[in-house]
Amino acid sequence: MSDFRADQRLLKWLDERYGIAPLVEFLREKEVPVGGHPMVWYFLGGATLFFFTVQIMSGVMLLMYYQPGEQTAYESIRYIVTKVPFGWLVRSVHCWSAHLMITSLVIHMFSTMMLKSYRPPRELTWVTGFVLFSLTLGFGFSGYLLPWNELAFFATSVGTDSVKSLPLIGEWLLQVLRGGPDVTINTLYRFFALHVCVLPITLVGLVTVHLLLIQRQGMAPPIGEHQVARGIRFFPNFVLRDLLLWLTCLAALVTLALLLPFGPGIPGFDWELGQKADPLAPAYPGIKPEWYFLWIYQLLKEFPPHLFGLEGPQLCLLVVTGLMATWALIPWLDRHARHNEPSPAFSDFGVGAIFFLLFLMLKAWDIGGNAQNSPDGLPDPAAVARTCAWILIPVAAATTMLRVAVFRHRWFVLSGAEVLHVALHGLGGVSYLAAGAIAAALAAFVIGITLLRADGIRPGEGGRR
Amino acid sequence: MLGASPPQEEGFAPSEKLAGLLAAKRDDGGPWIGADERAYFDELPARAKMLFDQVAKTELVSEPEHLRQILSLRLPVAQIELFLNDKCVVCHSDPAVQDRPEMLLSTDPKAAGSPAHMDLRESVSDVHFRRGLSCAGCHGGNPDDDEMADEIYDRWPDADKRARDRAWIPKFCARCHADPAFMRGFAPALPTDQYAKYRESRHGQLLLGKRDSKAAQCVSCHGAHGIRGPQSPRSKVHPKQVPETCGACHADAEHMAGYRLPNGKPLPTDQLADFKKSVHGRALLERGDLGAPACNDCHGNHAALPPSITSIAQVCRTCHAANGEFFDGSKHKEAFDREGWPECIQCHGNHAVAKTDDSMLSEDHSPLCYDCHRENANDSEKCNSTAKYFHESITTLAQGSESLSALVTSFDERGLDAEPLSEVTQELHDVLKDTRSRVHASDRSEFDDVAKRGRELINQGRQLEQQAEAEYRFRTNGLRAALGVMVLLGILLYLKIRQIESRG
């Protein structure tokens, strides 16, 4: 007995009582597949989980001093960042970690999409991931209001206002979200309840499901390979690498939090406290949401007040809902991947989606609008569209060259259509929606023709076999 | 604009004549009455439409162009009823009846060849017209009559005489405006002493005393038709318009030729140009700050008089009270009184008063204090050194205030607690203002009362700066230490991974 190491004795002690030997065995045997794509994509979920853990811990610390209320919310945050020992650090870490969490989550989601890891039998992992993504956006939106400062107040007014245009339930939902017809302190109370109670409980539950699914099924091997050719052991090899990454994330987080305590200063990516919210003050122009909502904000601006007998915002939200639903249902839509075959069209769909989001984001930042020199102080929309197109087109060209050269991609209809959309709008001066309709029609035509030819899509993407 | 009563369509059908006018076509086939005018008419209540019917039936309005002009005014319901019930304005706006353009009220007087004051749109916007005191109120006659009454011709002096001698105008306006009982029924808050003041003013003395009709009277500033209250931004007597209104005469060298100052020099005409450049003019005209003075705030309006040496300083004190009080207790006050110098303008100027600057006290940039001391105070070393002391102290405080304010921004950006420093800079800002004001007392001890506090505040700010820098050093050192530990841990982890993987 005495030559048993302490950890082995503990395991034995636990096994005698709880029968954990199979679990230990499972962890010993578990392997992570190493295949045709770089390992880095396997770590992004872990990084997201790390930032989420930081959020919970820093959030609890903030909660010890934060007091929601008309006379206390703003004041308590001010108190936290000025008087509480290391309060400035905790708030800064909480904000930085929030943005980094969403960043790694978005990259994680897109890498899963590009690697087609959503294919059977992992459809539910994708769907739970999608719901986690939506909940995270809810976290961002509800947390933004809590400091009760001017910018948060107006951004929340504008943000909640857009649900008004949902058919039938819009007005009702607006009242429910705001706790009344306008954004008031009642809105803050319910956002606070959502942010520190409802969302964390739901998210932790769902993360558990997401992780259990992954542990049960293992990581997805590269497409086309039914059997994992080779793998590395999950424990301790993969876990140690995970730890190394988490350590790097922590170092980056603390450095950023100290050197840039209010964010990098990009619109939608800063958390300067500013003035306390004053519901009676007039909203000032140019209020923008956080960066991950910018694309919806910009898309809403692209719609005219009325279109096809519907209100513009209504139609826009319909389009957004359609896009989101398509995204959530990808595991069932992508028939090639279902059969473990390359699906170049969906790879291209992912790239097209990135171009689509990127262009809207660039536009929302009014890049090239030269607002300072314009007589009314507002950016020139045509100049913004032109500049953003000139940024996106070279990026798209470089991406495409990379795809051709490295990944041997051969199918570019959807990403090409998005580039055409951007070019028609930014360089041709066609309105955003009209340009989109032309590009979509053209893409539909090309896909129709391809589908008619029986061997249409299959010979396209090779991947790196 | 309408909205007073909803359309009441029941019972109204336009007579043949009105229908004909509304549907009339131009020679080129287009309608006389455009869509906008027609929409305006359609939205009127039946009561107003009936009035249109009536003027069409009685042929007071018999031409489509006349009807179009009236509709194009888009008057509110109450106003259009006043208009149509007043035969003077209906008839005098009819181009078919008025063959002399000087008698025609037109929406486009230039095109119609009418004088500028015969602008129909302006006339119906007039404060008098809107209160129901229309043409007959001044011109006489009865607005219900179809014909011109003799009284109209008798009421005013003949046109030739009117143009030559304008002395009758103030008295004419005063019939109502100097009658408190009458004015109570229209504008109870409006004073009724304008005529009494005007008689005492330079303008009044010239016009009424010397029969100089070049002198301004009521119409010169308020206009004839289209008079608006001073609150209206389009009024000639709105604060922002006053400089141009006064300048119409006072900046016109030809008009002002022959007028002289008490010292015999010709009256200058550069006041308007000077005012526009001045700190007051820029505040009022460029920033739209209605608290800044226009001509009338210093010179008076109805009682406009050139301010004398004794009164000018009191005029400035109405706004700059603190500076005035400090000056009153100063040595300068005594000297200025002895020499008969006007107080404030001696250093600051009058119409062209510039924004004050600390360099006004400096010997290098502005010889203001030192030249005067040389000429009038035997170049007193004590006086000069006081001026220098003021300049040095204020410059130190101003520089301190500026650098501490910049520090507040830097603290904010670095996430340091800027609140205590921000309180210091705010108080310093007030102290600096106070010291600048106390220069007018020309007394070191009075100045030092606050300047001392300013120096203390700068020292406090510097201490806070040191504390904050120490805090920031603590933070960055802490970060370095934490990063060091993490890098070490990272290396250990990496080595461990290498070790495990080499074992296979």
Image: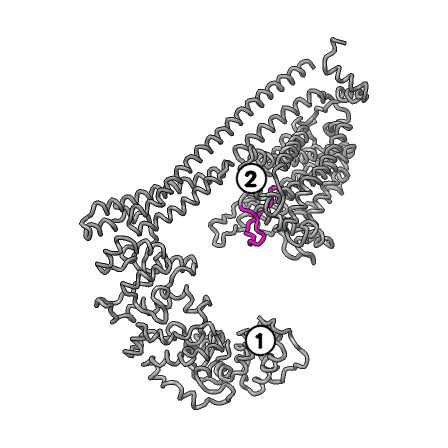
- Tag 1: amino acid: Val
Disc 1: which residue: B77
- Tag 2: amino acid: Tyr
Task: Return the residue nearer the eye: A452 or B435.
Answer: B435
In reply to whether residue A331 is colored magenta, the answer given is no
Mark drawn on residue A368: none
Farthest residue, direction left: B378
For the question of whether residue B342 can be seen, the reply is: yes
- Whether residues under marks 2 and 1 lie with C-beta atoms below 8 angstroms apart, the answer is no
Query: Residue B443 at x, y = what percent?
Result: 29, 48
Cα distance between the residues tagged 2 and 1? 59 Å
Left or right, residue B38 beside residue B247: right
Q: In which chain is the residue bearing label 2?
A: A
Task: Return the residue nearer the eye: A406 or A272.
Answer: A272
Disc 2: which residue: A79
Quarter-wise, where is residue A57 in the image? top right
Magenta-colored span: A275-293
Which corner quadrant holds the N terminus of chain A? top right
Q: Is residue B101 above or below residue A421?
A: below
Which corner quadrant holds the C terminus of chain A? top right
